[in-house]
Amino acid sequence: MSSDAFPHTTPSRDREPTAFTRYVAVGDSFTEGMADADPGRANAFVGWADRLAAHLARMAGDERPIFGYANLAVRGRLLADIAGPQVDNALALAPDLVSIVGGGNDILRPKADIDALAARLENSVARLRASGAEVLLATPTDPREAPLLRASRGRAATYAAHIWSIARRHEAYVIDLWGMAALRDWRMWAPDRIHLTSEGHRRVALNALTALGFTAPDAGWALPLPAADPISRAEAARANAHWARQYVGPWVQRRLRGQSSGDTISAKRPTITPLEG
């Protein structure tokens, strides 16, 4: 569907914050929470969406219905699955807030049709908004300093521009990851350089809370870390070579076999369940 078919509306960031009671997160590994290890469960992750849900549960207060949360995100998923079956399942849960963050795995493919991706995302946002749910989107991060991934910067920037336009047309909220300076520090990223550390997820959750109009309990979430000690070119080259062997090689092999890291993974929180504030 053409974006011209949707009405132009006022940006949502000017609205008063809303106390939500039913939050559903859909997406890929970013929203599943990879590399933010869950200390209470083996081989499980927390992530920014879980952390945001905990904040929202506290915001809901004791006088409102019990806050409920579901996370349908699965690592490796393309936007066709996120904006399709995951959104279908989200709508069946009757949420009042849905975060839909996807497209990153598509953008890594050199032949990705970014305009088509944006149209698919917009159709899903329109469906969610028509149900009465508020929608939270997120831009890609800026890959300008990432080895290999910097080749996708133009596609990522185009997609980010689409996301801001979609949000304006449908009064959706946006987490501005592209402009999040703290994420330009590799100490915020796991060794695979694709997923955030626990600190990175914590900060993104506070960014999301702020995007929804709330005041973050830690105002320093956007501040960069203190400068790191410099490393030599030789050290950087060795680190890059290790990264390529440990992470890029297996990713390429999965691509060649037509496999995804999430082929045997199911949603970690498939139904809305209570979350104490």
Image (tube, rainbow, N blue to C red):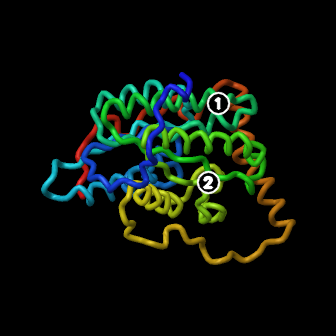
What residue is at 40 percent from the left and 36 percent from the top? 72
In this orientation, which residue lies closer to the viewer: 130 or 53?
Answer: 130
Residue at 42%, 49% (x, y): give it. 12
Residue 234, relative to residue 242: is it above or below? below
- Pick whichever, 259 or 176, lies toward us: 176
Residue 127 at x, y percent in the picture: 40, 28
- Residue closest to the far left: 63
Classify 10 Å Cα crowding around label 2: few (below 14), some (14-19), many (20 and above): some
Locate residue 176, reporting x and y percent: 54, 54
Judging by the rendered image, the residue that carries numbered circle 1 is 115
**Residue at image mark 2:** 178
Q: State the residue at coordinates (33%, 38%).
A: 133
Residue placed at 74% from the left, 43% from the top? 154
Q: In front here: 191 or 144? A: 144
Q: Quadrant of residue 269?
A: top left
97 or 8, nearer to the observer: 8
Q: Earlier in the sequence, mark 2 or mark 1?
A: 1
- Left or right position of 150 against 177: right
Q: Amino acid at mark 2?
A: Trp
Q: Which labelled disc corresponds to residue 80?
A: none
The residue type indicated by label 1 comes to: Asp
Picture layout, residue 166 above or below residue 40? above
The Cα–Cα distance between marks 2 and 1, rounded to whole angstroms, is: 19 Å
Q: Depth-wise, is mark 2 or mark 1 nearer the camera?
A: 1
Q: Name the quadrant of the C terminus.
A: bottom left
- Give the structural element (helix, strand or loop) at label 1: helix
Q: Quadrant of residue 111?
A: top right
Element type at marker 2?
loop
The quadrant where residue 24 appears:
top left
